[in-house]
């Protein structure tokens, strides 16, 4: 039994020497995992910042569009308000125009001064009168109250103006009421 007296060999030293190598590999793997997760974290943070930046750009564009729309709507509302206020004064302007045409408004009289001031105030807001004798008839701007056949015309022409039409800018306040000469049918 000589073999029994043999000293036992140390138990697998190579395993003990492998343990430090495994822990170094484990540390390297952990470091790599940390780097990968930090890179993923950095990518996620950059993606999130980019998303927030794009959201802010969209919000800024929406605000600019909103501001432009409000300004445009404000201008339209102003034009509508001016048009409605002037429309209320049209009967008075008609009376003054008739009085002037009949010679009732003499230059230098208080009524002539008032008429001039009202016309100037209307012009300040873009009020334009239209509808003159001899002008071509336009059914979008003129309201024909009378039609007279005539051999002298080749197209409908205003023969007489009964009531002037008025516009503010491009907005029609009231069509001109006119008598129209139309070509006589053969």
Image (spheres, rainbow, N blue to C red):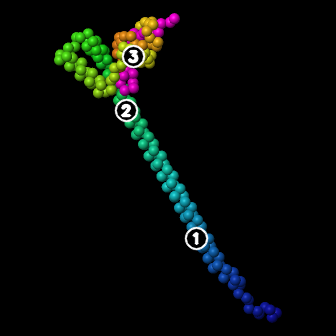
State the separation of the CA atoms marked 1 and 3. Answer: 92 Å
| Residue located 36% across and 16% down the image | 132
Mark 2 burial class by Cα count in 10 Å: few <14, some 14-19, many 20+:
few
Residue 69 in picture, x, y percent from top left? 42, 36
Residue 51 in picture, x, y percent from top left? 51, 52
The image shows residue 87, relative to residue 45, as above or below, that is: above
| Residue located 39% across and 30% down the image | 76
Q: Is residue 50 visible?
A: yes
What range is drawn magenta here? 167-186
Q: Name the residue under label 3.
A: 135
State the separation of the CA atoms marked 2 and 3. Answer: 32 Å
Q: In this view, does 156 lie to the left or right of 16?
A: left
The image shows residue 85, relative to residue 104, as above or below, that is: below
Q: Can residue 177 be seen in this view?
A: no
For marks 1 and 3 on the same chain, the one whose residue lies earlier in the sequence: 1
For marks 2 and 3 on the same chain, the one whose residue lies earlier in the sequence: 2
Q: Mark 2 points at which residue?
A: 75
Residue 164 in picture, x, y percent from top left? 34, 15
Q: Is residue 185 found inside the magenta-colored segment of the image?
A: yes
State the separation of the CA atoms marked 1 and 2. Answer: 65 Å
Q: Mark 1 points at which residue?
A: 31
User: Magenta stretch mostly in which secondary structure?
Assistant: strand
Q: Give SS at disc 1.
A: helix
- Foreground residue, 10 or 152? 152
């Amino acid at each position: 039994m000589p073999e029994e007296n043999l000293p036992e060999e140390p138990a697998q030293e190579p395993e003990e020497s492998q343990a430090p190598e495994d822990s170094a590999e484990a540390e390297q793997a952990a470091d790599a995992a940390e780097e990968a997760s930090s890179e993923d974290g950095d990518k996620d943070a950059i993606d999130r910042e980019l998303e927030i930046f794009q959201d802010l750009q969209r919000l800024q564009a929406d605000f600019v569009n909103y501001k432009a729309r409000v300004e445009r709507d404000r201008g339209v509302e102003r034009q509508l308000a001016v048009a409605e206020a002037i429309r209320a004064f049209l009967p008075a302007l008609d009376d003054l125009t008739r009085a002037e045409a009949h010679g009732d408004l003499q230059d230098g009289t208080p009524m002539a001064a008032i008429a001039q001031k009202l016309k100037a105030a209307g012009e300040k807001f873009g009020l334009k009168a239209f509808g003159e004798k001899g002008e071509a008839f336009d059914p979008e701007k003129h309201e024909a109250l009378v039609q007279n056949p005539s051999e002298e015309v080749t197209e409908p022409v205003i023969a007489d103006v009964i009531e002037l039409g008025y516009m503010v800018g491009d907005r029609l306040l009231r069509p001109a009421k006119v008598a129209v000469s139309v070509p006589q049918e053969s």
